Image (cartoon, rainbow, N blue to C red):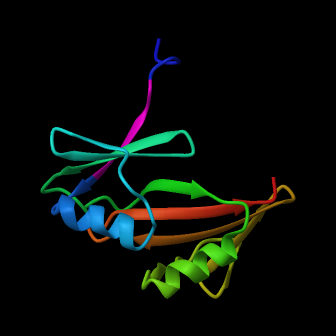
Amino acid sequence: MLNDATLYAVFPAKDAERLKQFFWDKLGLEPVEERMGMPFYEIGGSKFFIYESMFAGTNEATVASFAVTDLRPVVDELKSKGVVFEHYDMPDTTLDGDIHIMETDGIEMKSVWFKDTEGNILNINQSDE
């Protein structure tokens, strides 16, 4: 039924303009269009938009994940732009600077997490799969 639908991720923001600026300044993301005053983005075939909500930042789980082929240069660039990474104590995980390294069934995954201006948790990962 929904296999042919377009899926949009949504980023809640108490201040949509502030989050839009964060996406531009820190992540280099620019809206492809605006609808009803909301900025819409498209990256790698995925789509998302920002909407204002008084509940922004109340989720304690990851809201979006970006997959990259080489994590370290991405982390270095984001750090140079002032992004602060979260550190989590997770089983079977080692921390190399800000990068969490996990291995399961012979597959290694490297991940980082950070919060945007609204408290939403974002993830970037690299897998050898």
Seen from the viewer's position, the closer of residues 7 and 107 is: 7
Q: Residue furthest left?
A: 54
**Residue at coordinates 55% horizontally, 39% vertically from top-left?**
45
Q: Which quadrant would residue 72 be assigned to in this image?
A: bottom right
| Left or right relative to 128: residue 49 | left
Please tell me whether the stretch drawn in magenta is mainly helix, strand or loop: strand
| Left or right relative to 127: residue 80 | left
Is residue 39 shown to the viewer in this render? yes
Seen from the viewer's position, the closer of residues 47 and 65 is: 47
126, above or below 4, in the image: below
Q: Which quadrant would residue 59 be assigned to in this image?
A: bottom left
| Residue 116 locus on image (x, y percent) | 35, 69
> Magenta stretch?
6-11
| Residue 62 locus on image (x, y percent) | 44, 58
| Residue 128 locus on image (x, y percent) | 81, 59
**Residue at coordinates 52% horizontally, 76% vertically from top-left?**
88
Is residue 100 shown to the viewer in this render? no
Q: Residue furthest top?
A: 1
